[in-house]
Amino acid sequence: MLLILLILLLISIVFLLYKANKNTKDVAINNISLSETEIKLANKQLNILHLSDLHLENISISPQMLQKMIEKQQIDLIALTGDFLDRKRSIPKLIPYLEVLKNIKPRLGMYAVFGNHDYVLKGTNFQRLKETLEQNGCKTLQNEHLTLDVDGKKLNIIGIDDFSTKRSNLLHSYNGLEEGYNLVLTHDPNIVLEMKDFHFDYLLSGHFHGGQIHWPKPYHLIKMGKLVRMKMVKGLHYHNGKPFYISEGLGQTGVNIRVGSRPEITFHTLS
């Protein structure tokens, strides 16, 4: 009897792990639309593709699969919010994904910030990651910003470095900023709690993976900052009246499974 129970338990565990791994291929394609009276961008809408947390050591979505999911969308700007990889051997694996994104030819370009896992790379290896992004059409931002002219309006893209590894510098990020629409890209969304004196119109982030194992609750995220205790781990939220989005990410970390969460591709429309 005991042997039968152990066999049944083993079968159940194998099935649950199989299902959890299968979940990593079940991509959620989310569309977020913001219509705000304070948006001072243009009369036209702005379409942003947001990807985060590729974690190329544990990703179930191939470049070809990514292409099929995004190729029919009208995309003006691509935002990548960090945690591409944490092993130097994974750097070449990033190139086909970047080629898919570059071939979309977003009219306003592609921009990226780095996350805590990217900074596991040191020295020349981190520089290789940065150069790989830049050589494949992606502008990287580390506590800096740039300003684009969009139909006669100013769009400020502000890249704030990773908060969780204490690399964020808001003063540097905003230094010399022109008046316009402030789109912030950052990895760890906890930075919003420090931005009372730094205006943003919209902020895109990742880091939490939606818990990745979100059952019954993502208790393991508690150590990852105050937002978790405020029950802000994924999706669209507001702090001090300002909107920010937390992506569940496209890849996984640790083990290639998801429970109660899904990989995510997000299209944001600002109109």
Image: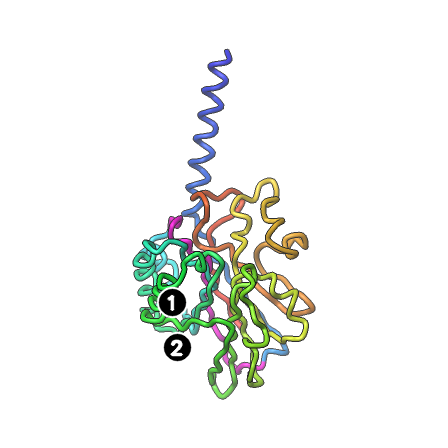
Q: For this rendering, which residue is in front, 134 or 121?
A: 121
Tell me where the magenta segment starts and ends, as one range.
40-60
Disc 1 marks which residue? 130
Disc 2 marks which residue? 107
Assess disc 1: are there few (<14), some (14-19) or many (≥20) residues with their C-alpha within 10 Å of its C-alpha: many
Of all residues shown, which one is farthest toward the right?
240
Q: For this rendering, which residue is in front, 50 or 205?
A: 205
Mark number displayed over residue 84: none
Residue 148, given in percent of the width and then of the height, sits at 47, 82
Q: In this view, does 257 lie above or below 106?
A: above
Q: Does the magenta stretch include residue 52?
A: yes
Assess disc 2: are there few (<14), some (14-19) or many (≥20) residues with their C-alpha within 10 Å of its C-alpha: few
Q: In the image, what residue occupies the spot 32% across and 54% down?
A: 89
The amino acid marked with disc number 2 is: Arg
* Residue 40, quarter of picture: bottom right
Residue 192, given in percent of the width and then of the height, sits at 62, 66
Q: In the image, what residue occupies the spot 39% across and 77% down?
A: 107
Q: In the image, what residue occupies the spot 67% across and 75% down?
A: 197
